Image (cartoon, rainbow, N blue to C red):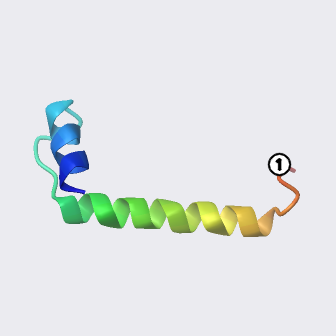
Amino acid sequence: MRLLADKAVELGYFEDISHETVRRTLKKRNQTLAKERMGNSSGTKQ
């Protein structure tokens, strides 16, 4: 997580970001993706 946070700052996406913020953001994203997959098991968008 620290490497991702450092790279995001290096690329100019943020002036400063903590590794914990990166971890929480990725966790929320993964949870959202899992919920979307569960809601649409056919793999196609309706």
Residue 25 is left or right of residue 16, and the answer is right
The percent position of residue 44, horizontal first and vertical second, equals 85, 49
Above/below status of 3 relative to 28: above
Identify the residue under disc 1: 45
Above/below status of 27 relative to 44: below
The percent position of residue 45, horizontal first and vertical second, equals 83, 48
Give the residue type that dot 1 points to: Lys
Q: Quadrant of residue 12?
A: top left
Residue, far left: 16
Residue at the spot 11% in from the left edge and 41% down from the top edge: 15
Residue 8 is left or right of residue 42, and the answer is left
Residue 39 is left or right of residue 8, and the answer is right
- Per the image, label 1 sits on a secondary structure element best described as loop
The percent position of residue 7, horizontal first and vertical second, equals 20, 39
Residue at the spot 25% in from the left edge and 62% down from the top edge: 21
Within 10 Å of disc 1 (Cα), the crowding (few <14, some 14-19, many 20+) is few
The percent position of residue 17, horizontal first and vertical second, equals 16, 52
Q: How many marks?
A: 1
Q: Nearer the viewer, residue 44 or 3?
A: 3
Where, quadrant-wise, is the N terminus in this rendering?
A: bottom left
Residue at the spot 40% in from the left edge and 59% down from the top edge: 26
